[in-house]
Image (cartoon, coloured by chain):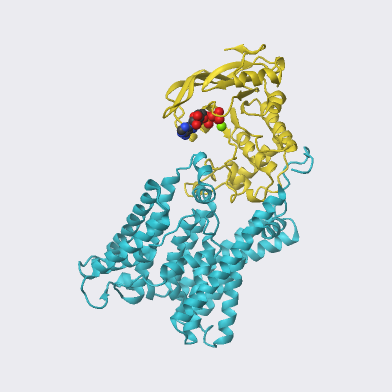
Amino acid sequence: MNAAKVPSLRILETRGLSKRFGSVQALSGVDLDIHAGSVLALLGDNGAGKSTLVKIVSGVHRPDSGELFLDGSRIDIASPRDASTAGIETVYQDLALCENLNVTQNLFLGRERRSRGSALWRMFLDRRSMEEEAERAFEILGTRIPSLSNPISTLSGGQRQAVAIARAIVWQSRVVMFDEPTAALGVEQTENVHGLIRRLRDQGVGVLLITHNMVDVFALADRALVLRQGHRVAEMDPRRSTPDDVVRAITGSEAAGVRPS
Amino acid sequence: MSQPRPRSEPVVSAAPFKEKLQRISHGELGLIPVLAALLAVGIIFHIASPYFLTPRNLSNLTLQVGVLGVMALGMSLVLFIGEIDLSAGSVSGFCAVALVLLSAQYGLPGVLAIGIAILCGAAIGGIHGKLVTLVGAPSFIVTLTGLLVWQGAQRMLVGNQIGQILIDDPLVISIASTFMPFWLSLTLVLIIVGASLIYCARQLGSNRFSGAADRLGLIARSMLFPVLAILILAVLSNHLGVPVLLLILACVALVLTLITEHTAFGVHIFAVGGNAEAARRAGINVAKLKILLFSSCSAFAAFSGIIAVSRQYAADGNTGGGNLVLDAIAAAVIGGTSLFGGRGRIQGSLLGALVIGTVANGLDLLGHSANVKSIITGLILLGAVSVDMIARKRRIQSGAAGA
Ligand SMILES: Nc1ncnc2c1ncn2[C@@H]1O[C@H](COP(=O)(O)OP(=O)(O)O)[C@@H](O)[C@H]1O
Ligand SMILES: [Mg+2]
């Protein structure tokens, strides 16, 4: 499924999100739409408010004002748990993995499956079903993991990325937000992460991709949205723009090809 | 990732035996060091004293290890989340004195006095946990304060009574001085053997254990506890029988093992110990979990105080004092628990307590002083920490090598 051809389906919308930290207005009235099977790049200079936006949607911060809509109806996201219940997953730059836990434990952290049966049995974990689900997720991602019962500390950087992304598949997340996924990666690893994100998108997931990296934008994004000092200043189609257009929108100089929003 | 992406072959689940070897080579040593240490001290004392392996002495050893064992199990819980509880000895002593006073001075029945003492411990631990999570003070400082405060409170409870306060409640006394009749011990051993055989047979039936080495490893592992149980029964029934205290210790260890290794809560404990921020983002209530574990640790400390009272028929201002709390921390670390959090096993802490108890018992037999015990225990701890540091380096290297 490619969002460029198929008319896209809105999953998540934000309307007028604002957030202030002391004297800093981190976000001012930001609207955005995330569509199924499509990648939306969120761009902006350091301090533009990108991470703040992701943290509001993932339940880490509460907005001062503004609303969130899932499938057209208003939702309240007060905690990370609310976000995951709503099918919104975040892949943080630091990946937020527990290195001492194994792959399966990390995938199911906070939402473990329990054995079926009497009340006593239900206290215990259903390891087998979690492992099967984990294997399925890595199959979809096309990633090779040496063993699901090895701790994360034994995995390479690329494998860790895959584990963080596989969470979204296990949870059948409808929206996955990436905060600078390629910032610390080399060329080959970046290529790998692009592959993983495309596979997520092909599953019909709506992807929000925060990045500084023009390569990410032009390789992946169906649309790009630019924030400057907390304001949404432009929305563009990477297929009809040049990297120069995008950079100009980020830095604030007027440019052709930019559709002010 | 250095290799090209092989899209056709996703997860390769290595055989359990191969996985295990790989994990050991990556520095995941598990119970190997503590089992080796236990075997070593056992052999050394057997050579040094013909009396060491007699039923009478081994029976004594199991009773001696009760107080330390229970405290070490509770201590493991806070160590797993990367915290520490230096107050466990004081809390143990405070609750022991409270128990004796409630029973001897206020005439409360044993069950009630024991219940109050344990609740008292749980409440104290809850306060420590609240201070750690709300104020954000390091647990080292909070529980060091606790050590001083509860020790003072314990001595105030004792007041100006000279010597020990005696207790004669039959229930309290019976905890450490009752031995199970042979038929009961035999039944329990048969249950353990039966359960292990069923477990082994079911696992052998699954396709995970197809290789010969895997099957042998599985059989060896599932036979460990039955063999141990039969040995204990065979040896101890030559003296007074299997002490009830040993059964209590085994049950506590079993329940804590099930919780820490087979429930979601157990995974959350290690998640908080490994990366508290990641645990929080996964929706785990980190503060609540920490408070609960501090509370449990102190409740177990109180329980160890009750066992101490049961062994001595009394308590005083020094109950729970001395090296006890440091020995409990040492027991957990010798058993493979990391002081950095996120790593360790309940069985390891129990075995670690057994190592320290064996060293104390053996040196007693050989007529050495408490000072020698202290030095030897310290050296074993140093050895355990060194093994852990080397293994940690290997883990970091193997992680980096894969990157
Ligand atoms: N928790 C916070 N407390 C105070 N100020 C914050 C906090 N988080 C972000 N800010 C401020 O809000 C602004 C936007 O930050 P952020 O969303 O992290 O930007 P970006 O991710 O686009 O670089 C910055 O000026 C930053 O200093
Ligand atoms: Mg940021």
Q: Residue at x 51, y 54 (%)?
A: B260
Q: Tell how many labels.
A: 0
Left or right relative to A128: residue B22: right
Q: Position of residue A202 (x, y in %)?
A: 69, 26
Question: In the rendered image, is residue B49 in sight?
Answer: yes
Question: In the rendered image, is residue B238 in sight?
Answer: no
Residue closer to the observer: A253 or A149 = A253
Specify the quadrant of the image occupied by residue A106: top right
Q: In the rendered view, would you say B240 is above or below A224?
A: below
The N terminus of chain B sits in image quarter: top right
Q: Which quadrant contains ligand 2?
A: top right
Q: Residue at x 29, y 60 (%)?
A: B116
Q: Position of residue B241 (x, y in %)?
A: 46, 78
Left or right relative to B41: residue B321: left
Q: Position of residue B29 (x, y in %)?
A: 63, 62
Q: In the rendered view, would you say B222 is above or below A39?
A: below
Residue closer to the observer: A8 or A215 = A215
Residue sitting at the far front: A253
Please identify which colour was used for chain A in the image: yellow
Q: In the rendered view, would you say B181 is above or below A172?
A: below
Q: Position of residue A158 (x, y in %)?
A: 69, 41
Left or right relative to B120: residue A214: right
Please identify which colour was used for chain B in the image: cyan
Specify the quadrant of the image occupied by residue A44: top right
